[in-house]
Amino acid sequence: MKDQFFQYIQDLQSKIIAKLEEVDGKAKFLRDNWEREEGGGGLSCVLTDGAVFEKAGVNISKVYGELPETMQKALNVSSGKFFACGLSLVIHPTSPHIPTTHANWRYFEMYDKEGNIVDQWFGGGQDLTPYYLDEKDVMHWHTICKKSCDAHDAAFYLKYKEECDKYFWNTHREEARGIGGLFFDYLKPTSEKTVEQWYDFVTEVGNSFLEAYIPIVEKHKNDEFSDEQKEWQEIRRGRYVEFNLIHDRGTLFGLKTNGRIESILMSLPKHVQWHYNHQPEEGSEEYRLVDVLKHPKDWI
């Protein structure tokens, strides 16, 4: 399974990069192969200063070896041998009318001292962070998320949509990072679902990403915007940074397993602002967005 899933994320990385370069029409991804001293490595691909995308990263990694004691305690395991691989992407568009997006699909194995698999699971999801609220965009995004879930279990969409709303919540701000999507973790084989069935589900979600995001980009990439709208985008990006550095499990896992810092912090935007006690004007489009972020809703 680990070889099968790693091949899948390699192929998906190539597909997503090709599409993003096509849509941008100007910039190309820098490809950076790296190795991890304790075992494994990855390929980080980053685009900057494009015609449409200010910064985009589509990274894959495969790491293995001994799990640090801090992570053993967090996962409640006594053996430290592990394998993990995944694809993680973050796209920060130039225009404030195009949402930022993040997606991640990953697979994890734990082993006993003889090298036998004692635990295995999938995790991942995809979420959308708009700066101005276009309800048709949000409904399109959630419709694609629901379609990929419904192909496997009618209960999945609501379950993983709620998990997403709960996970991408900036508790110190009492607001969501964005308008959600899907989030799932610890998808383990059981008597009801085999590891192959979980693989089919996770890859279905991965395959749906471009269908969910690219139409939104194409719709807004030629929209005009003001300096004030750009400033608002950069202020909101500050909240994105706060979540990734304070709450995100992937960031914390990477830091605690001696991950590659450039790849871990790839998710951070190129331009961002923090203003003291900034409040949008009541009744404005900016205020309308924040109101939705403070009160997550069902979009379908």
Image (cartoon, rainbow, N blue to C red):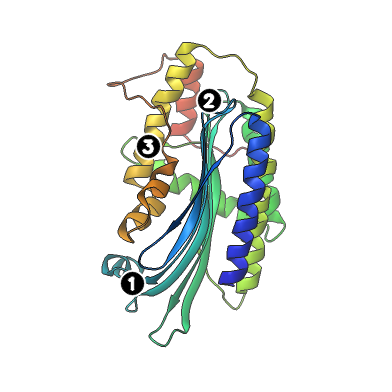
Say above or below: 182 vs 86: above
Left or right of 97 on screen, residue 273: left
Q: Position of residue 259 (x, y in %)?
A: 36, 57
Which residue is drawn at the image coordinates 67% and 64% (left, top)? 200
Residue flagged by tag 1: what amino acid is it? Asn
Say whether residue 108 is visible. yes
Which residue is drawn at the image coordinates 31% and 21% (left, top)? 275
- Give the residue number, with chain letter if any, for mark 2: 94
Query: Is label 3 in a helix, a strand or a loop?
Result: helix
Question: Around disc 2, counting alpha carbons within 10 Å, would you say few (fewer than 14), some (14 to 19), or many (20 or more)?
Answer: many
Question: Around disc 3, counting alpha carbons within 10 Å, would you say few (fewer than 14), some (14 to 19), or many (20 or more)?
Answer: some
Left or right of 156 on screen, residue 266: left
Which residue is drawn at the image coordinates 32% and 78% (left, top)? 78
Which quarter of the figure is the C terminus placed in?
top right
Residue flagged by tag 3: what amino acid is it? Val
Q: Position of residue 32 (x, y in %)?
A: 49, 49
CA–CA distance in space, label 1 to label 2: 42 Å
Which residue is drawn at the image coordinates 42% and 18% (left, top)? 231
- Give the residue number, with chain letter if any, for mark 3: 241
Q: Position of residue 10 (x, y in %)?
A: 60, 57
Q: Earlier in the sequence, mark 1 or mark 3?
A: 1
- Give the residue number, with chain letter if any, for mark 1: 76
Which quarter of the figure is the N terminus placed in?
bottom right
Task: Please state which of the two labelled residues, at mark 1 or mark 3, is closer to the viewer.
Answer: 3
Left or right of 195 on screen, residue 211: right
Q: Earlier in the sequence, mark 1 or mark 2?
A: 1
The residue lying toward the viewer, choosing from 142 and 267, is 267
Q: Are marks 1 and 3 in contact (CB under 8 Å)?
A: no
Left or right of 107 on screen, residue 279: left
